[in-house]
Image (spheres, grey):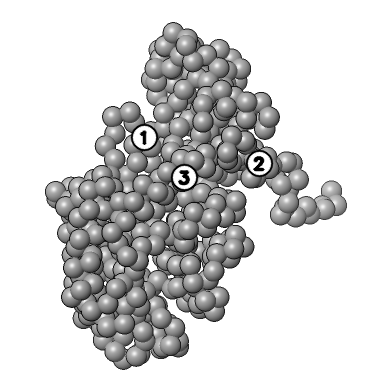
Amino acid sequence: MTNSDLLGIAENFGKPLYVYESEKITSQYERLTSAFANVKNLRINYAAKALSNVSVLKFMRHLGAGLDTVSIQEVQLGLNAGFEPKAIIYTPNGVSLNEIENVAKLGVQINIDNLSVLEQFGTRHPKTPVCIRINPHVMAGGNSNISVGHIDSKFGISIHQIPHLLRIVENTAMKINGIHMHTGSDILDIDVFLHAAEILFDTAKHFKELEFLDFGSGFKVPYHKNDIETNIEELGEKLSVRFSKFCMEYGGELQLIFEPGKFLVSQAGHFITQVNVVKQTTSTVFAQVDSGFNHLIRPMLYGSYHHIENLSNPQGKERFYSIVGYICETDTFGNNRKIAEITEGDLLVFRNCGAYCFSMASNYNSRYRPAEVFWHEGQGHLISKRETFEDILRNQVELSFNL
Ligand SMILES: *Cc1c(COP(=O)(O)O)cnc(C)c1O
């Protein structure tokens, strides 16, 4: 998809606008499945929270993916998009036992990440197979910023608690059909990831009725021009060999699962905004767009980098700008960026806006959330409408005061 395609879409559907390219999603999906082509029973469960539009979920199903969900609402979205309950895994953190029971009733695979709920669930539903989320506590080079499931993380059951875990499983006679880890950090060092995988294998040996091993996600995609990304091909080669060796020893062909979000949709997404004001101060030139952290919060929430280009003047002389929003808070998208000369009214595009962008959008400042368009086979299809004033008032209850 070209920049002139994006301009055409903005003309048709208005701004600000999220656009997702189906072709990029497909190529990422195929890249991952090819890297693991030697695994007999591979499953890619798309992490719905990255981008949860029902049409995107349907597209994932069409590719052959299953679904990774973290709330009962995401489960319902998945069922609504036509996923079989069996193709959905539910990996919540800190939710009520009641919600977990309701999801289990739908026939969805449950993944439990704490001993308290495991014991209660196992006692009440010993026949429902459950997956266990472990925390492998692997540290990459001693740097806690890139640690893999660090010791104080709220996610997963610590591998130091395996004896306690085994006692609960034995006492309740519950069935454990899968072992899971999702470290949440970027897999840059393949050897560190393989080390965590060894811990998963070690844990798996304790259970006799396993059907799958779920290695979670953490695939890093490039945001910056010079960013390193996870070497999926190398990981595929090494982990496939190790996995099939494990299956031989285990005495059964298990399913290998990954649950990528960002890897599948990040680069497929483009966010188009329009410049309202170019404002020169003593030290900076601000370009203020018709957006803010109500639409794209990642730069402000965790300092993520999104490449920004001027769609309207691509050949213009490059100058330095701070790109900010229109929200009454500091909402800097990018500081001191070199961008082709910007004039008021120009359209800017933010890259890597497929994952955790629209799904984190809000109505702060009582602004509408943007529309979303799916670019498929050379055509733009609206997949969520721009909000209207009725949406802002929808759940508000107006009291009448007799003043
Ligand atoms: C968020 C999440 C993912 C997806 O992570 P990405 O970094 O987007 O690939 C996978 N599994 C679980 C359990 C998650 O919570």
Mark 3 and mark 1: Cα distance apart in space:
16 Å
Q: In the rendered structure, which disc, 2 or 3, sits on the residue that comes first in sequence?
A: 3
Front-most of 120 and 86? 86
Residue at the spot of label 1: 223
Q: In the rendered structure, which disc, 3 or 1, sits on the residue that comes first in sequence?
A: 3
Up the image or down, 316 lies above or below 41; here it is above
**Mark 3 Cα shell of 10 Å, populated few (<14), some (14-19), many (≥20):** many
Front-most of 115 and 377? 377
Q: In the rendered structure, which disc, 2 or 1, sits on the residue that comes first in sequence?
A: 1
| Tag 1 secondary structure | loop
Percent across and percent down for residue 260 are: 39, 53
Q: Quadrant of residue 301?
A: top left
Badge 3 vs badge 1, beta-carbon distance below 8 Å:
no
Residue 382 shows which numbered tag?
A: 2
Q: Give the amino acid at mark 2.
A: Leu
**Mark 2 Cα shell of 10 Å, populated few (<14), some (14-19), many (≥20):** some
Is residue 154 in view?
Answer: no
Which circle, 2 or 1, is nearer the viewer? 2
| Tag 3 secondary structure | helix
Q: Residue furthest right?
A: 402
At horizontal 52% and vertical 58% (from top left) the residue drawn is: 61
Residue at the spot of label 3: 25
At horizontal 31% and vertical 78% (from top left) the residue drawn is: 210
At horizontal 36% and vertical 86% (from top left) the residue drawn is: 174
| Tag 2 secondary structure | strand
Residue 337 shows which numbered tag?
A: none
Q: Give the amino acid at mark 1.
A: Tyr
At horizontal 33% and vertical 28% (from top left) the residue drawn is: 225
